[in-house]
Image (cartoon, rainbow, N blue to C red):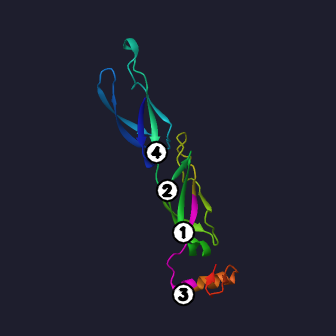
Amino acid sequence: TSDVTISFDEAVSGCEKLITLQNPQTGKRQSLQVHIPAGIDTGKSIRLKGKGMPGTGGGEAGDLLLNITVTAKPGWERKEMDVYSTVRIPFTTAVFGGEALVSTLYGNVLCRIAAGTQSGTKIKLKGKGIVSMKNPSVRGDQYVTIQIQVPQNLNYSAKEKLHEYAKACGLERSNATGSHVA
């Protein structure tokens, strides 16, 4: 057996890897070009027929198992064929609705955001997950969690408008000093 580490993106799309093996008996090194199939995950193995140790008494060489490890990709999580990510949207898009640009494994897509969307809402992007190793026409899904960006540096006018909104909704009360408390 031999261990091979590949990136998250290489596991998604498949790749060719050049691996170098050393025969423990002779010390001879051999390089092999190996195809890593799309959709492979950590813990899976690839069997290379006839690339293992020579058989006893001059018999045929055995098979070599390549144990695969896939490195993590920041901002992405994989669970079998499904992937999970997060997108940050402006507060105003969450309130009024609109669109958000979401990164997928296969490029960016525009997602419709419904008015009144709450932080933590999940959007399912069908077929934007990992391809099946058994059937290349089948893909998992991508689940995108919405995070709302709360405005930090509001000017006076914008703050006043938000205070008016909070009052109109009964979300704010005035304290004894006359400043607003939400």
Question: Which tag, 2 or 1, sits closer to the chain's start?
Answer: 2
Residue 89, label in figure? 1
Question: Which tag, 3 or 1, sits closer to the chain's start?
Answer: 1
Residue stretch rendered in magenta on the structure: 144-159
Q: Which residue is mark 3?
A: 157
Q: Which residue is mark 4?
A: 11
Label 3 with label 1: CB-CB less than 8 Å: no
- Residue 102, image x, y percentages: 51, 62
| Residue type for callout 4 | Ala
Q: Identify the secondary structure beneath mark 2.
A: loop
Residue 75, label in figure? 2
- Is 41 a magenta residue? no
Q: 57 left or right of 182? A: left
| Rendering quarter of residue 18 | top left
- Residue 121, image x, y percentages: 62, 63
Instruction: For label 1, count other residues whose C-alpha is less than 10 Å away and answer few (under 14), some (14-19) or many (20+).
Output: many
Q: Identify the secondary structure beneath mark 4.
A: helix
Residue at (54%, 46%) from the top-left corner?
A: 137
| Residue type for callout 1 | Ile
Label 4 with label 1: CB-CB less than 8 Å: no
Per the model, the C-alpha gap separating discs 3 and 2 is 35 Å
Question: Which tag, 2 or 4, sits closer to the chain's start?
Answer: 4
Up the image or down, 31 lies above or below 167; here it is: above
Per the model, the C-alpha gap separating discs 2 and 1 is 15 Å
Per the model, the C-alpha gap separating discs 3 and 1 is 22 Å
| Residue type for callout 2 | Gly
Question: Which tag, 3 or 4, sits closer to the chain's start?
Answer: 4
Residue at (47%, 48%) from the top-left corner?
A: 72
